[in-house]
Amino acid sequence: MTSLSFARRENSSGIYVTGKTFYVKEALKLVGARWEPPCWVIPFEADSPEFRTGLIEKANAEIKAERSAERAKRAYESSSEGRAKAHAEWEAFVIEALKKKTLTGEYHYLCCEKVSKPEWRGGRPRTSCPIHGFCINGSRYVGD
Ligand SMILES: [Zn+2]
């Protein structure tokens, strides 16, 4: 897999770089590259095999780091500690949301402090609650 591609085009003022350029944007700017949507164009004088190799290695390293950070995040989220934290955040959110609901009617789909996170189905929030059962739009679900 190549993260970046380089191309020389007719009448161009530089080398076109495409691919996962987001990860090397700053390195491109440093050599005076210009953004010509959807490509970066690096000046001919900045181009060399070493520059290209270095740029590809940097992009690959950034992509790899991002993937391992995502994996670590997912592992944390599925751990008991991560789940407990998410639950605590949800409870804190619900308390605030219920205050707003009283004042403005916003968060109408939250019935009480015991409510679960809503799953949105067909644009409608479906929550479950040990007190109120299944709720849609904040009222008890009785089926359509
Ligand atoms: Zn409830």
Image (cartoon, grey):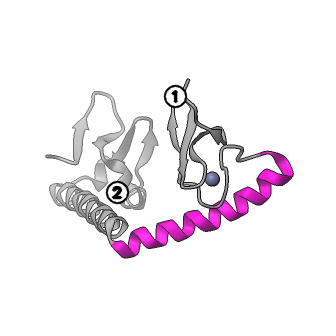
Residue closer to the observer: 50 or 78? 78
Q: What residue is rendered at 35% in x and 56% in y?
A: 23
Mark 2 vs mark 1: give the one in front: 1
Q: Position of residue 60 (x, y in %)?
A: 22, 58
Q: Position of residue 137 (x, y in %)?
A: 65, 38
Q: Label 1 sits on what residue type? A: Gly
Q: What residue is rendered at 53% in x and 52% in y?
A: 117
Vertical arrangement, residue 82 with respect to residue 59, above or below: below
Q: Position of residue 20 (x, y in %)?
A: 30, 47
Magenta segment's dominant SS is: helix
Tell me the residue that label 2 is attached to.
Answer: 24
The count of marks equals 2
Quarter-of-image position of residue 105: top right
Say the numbered circle drawn on residue 98: none
Q: Position of residue 7 (x, y in %)?
A: 23, 37
Q: Is residue 144 left or right of residue 19?
A: right
Q: What residue is rendered at 66% in x and 44% in y?
A: 109
Vertical arrangement, residue 60 with respect to residue 109, above or below: below
Crowd class of label 2 (few under 14; some 14 to 19; many from 20; radius 10 Å): some
- Boundaries of the magenta span: 80-105
Residue closer to the observer: 31 or 101? 101
Q: Label 2 sits on what residue type? A: Val
Crowd class of label 1 (few under 14; some 14 to 19; many from 20; radius 10 Å): few
Say the numbered circle drawn on residue 122: 1
Quarter-of-image position of residue 83: bottom left
Q: Is residue 75 left or right of residue 102?
A: left
Report helix, strand or loop for mark 2: helix
Q: Can residue 103 be found in the magenta stretch?
A: yes
